[in-house]
Image: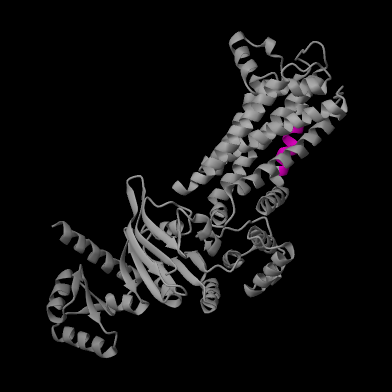
Amino acid sequence: MTASVTMIGRSIRLSRRNFDLVIMAIVLPVLMMALFVYVFGGAISTSVQSYVDYVVPGILVLCTGYGATSTAMSVTDDVQKGVVDRFRSMPISGFSVLTGHVVASVARNALATSAVVLVAVLMGFRPAATVGEWVLAMGLLLLYVLALSWLAAAFGVIARTVESASLLGFFMLFIPYLSSAFVPVATMPPWLRAVSEHQPITPVIETVRALLNGQPVTSGWLALAWSGGLLVVAFGWATWLFGRISRR
Amino acid sequence: MIVETEGLTKRYGSTTVLNGLDLTVAEGAVLALLGPNGAGKTTTIRVLSTLTRPDGGTARVCGFDVVREGADVRGVISLTGQYAAVDEEQTGRENLVMIARLRRFARPAARARAVELLERFGLTDAADRRVRTYSGGMRRRLDLAMSLVARPRLLFLDEPTTGLDPVSRTTMWDAIGDLVRDGVTIFLTTQYLEEADRLADRIVVLHNGGVVADGTADALKNSVGGTRLDLVFSSAEDALRARDVVGGAVDGPTLSVPSDGSAVHLHRVLDDLLAARAGVLRVSAHRPTLDDVFTSLVLADATAMAGVTA
């Protein structure tokens, strides 16, 4: 327990001091949102609601997902620099080493999410959510980020270079475009629509959007199942992989 | 015995890195594992410090099996790897406190231990600067300090001074020498004969994943002989003619003659050559280097293996 707390303290201190990481975690989401609201927003029709209300939940899910993948880079960096060897030669669990990275990632994303919501409100985002719905929406996002952070941690253990670890971020930045994040899936060709409706990010986005805009939630359990399932699988995979480093 | 291995093997794909390594180390000893790149030095340390699982054989550290009782092994050892494994963006003090906390020191005890080690390794003035600003020597000293937080019984040092300038190297040697006086058992790898000579009371030479020599530094040096004189002639024919007079081995226009390094011997060689009218252009004397040790041991090893297969 002490080991995990110490590792969390270490990872948070390191991310606080890595200026690039902080900038990337906050500025990128804000720029993306401005791009979609001001540049594309005028051309995209989502009928009932204003586009800013439609797109903010999508941006939140995209950016937290992308932010979570920086976990992969920090884990790979530790493996490459021999820091992981030092920890592995000490009587502490692999779990605590990875936990430090994952919790720091969740903390960075919580900060980024707050910044995005704040700027969104300045841009005209007017969520209709009650306090309860806010809590549920943020709770789901947290679960989603936690799951993706563990997934990224697993990638970080496998990746041989920090550059290849950063590839995960590229995928996480791209996949949400094939969802209802920016445009309603009804506007897509049928084959793409089938992909978009059945990928895990869509129910998460739909649920966060419904909660924040005070609409009926239709895919809540599906979102929970995807995120929870991913968390369990990713956690198991990451800790298993970490234990197998010794076989290399 | 604090370290005992029997028939230790490790393969990476089709490459055999450790080939039935048998090794014992007594408590309180300073053992240097010497060998060229790829001899299996780092792999040996990685297996003994539980970082890598062996494919065959057994290894025990302080009586604990490195595979089945890894956690117990980790409780009594410390490892300083080849690259200073320190957090660049933390200060020296923060790095040390972190390790102390991971070693289950209470917060005040962790801080006190950090102060003590910073002082001991001459890092007090730099304690609150980020490690990013440290010199290579300071990093290595911090790395070593981090390995000593929990007072290990056995300390692994993997090439502790590779890449350091001569002054930092001497400082590092002094720091390691102090540990020896404290009674810590030290297991180090190195490519420098001088380093092994200075620190270790026993040197084991690895080649192709097995032990090819085991003894003190003096024994090792004596095994490859004393000084060698290289005499350069204007042609290969002259060198061959000179060999008939004073002996030795010819390589092109160069004749190598074994020597005791004395002026008397050099005089006699030159006088004999003068009498034989073999004109020497240049003379140089060489002390045995690690290369010579390797070359002679590796050659002997290859000959022995050829003898077995023949």
Q: Residue at x 17, y 69 (%)?
A: B236
Chief SS of the magenta region: helix
Comparing A229 with A41, the one in front is A229
Residue A23 part of the magenta segment: yes
Bounds of the magenta segment: A22-30
Instruction: Name the quadrant containing residue A179.
Output: top right
Relative vertical location of residue A3 with respect to residue B219 in this rendering, above or below: above
Q: Is residue A231 left or right of residue A29?
A: left
Q: Residue at image x 60%, y 46%?
A: A95
Q: Is residue B186 visible?
A: yes
Residue B72, given in percent of the width and then of the height, sits at 52, 59
The image shows residue B114 at horizontal and vertical percentages of 68, 67
Residue B39, position in %: x, y? 36, 59
Above or below A239: residue B104 = below
Q: Quadrant of the N terminus of chain B?
A: bottom left
The quadrant of the image that shows the C terminus of chain B is bottom left
In the rendered structure, the answer to whether residue A244 lies left or right of residue A28 reads left
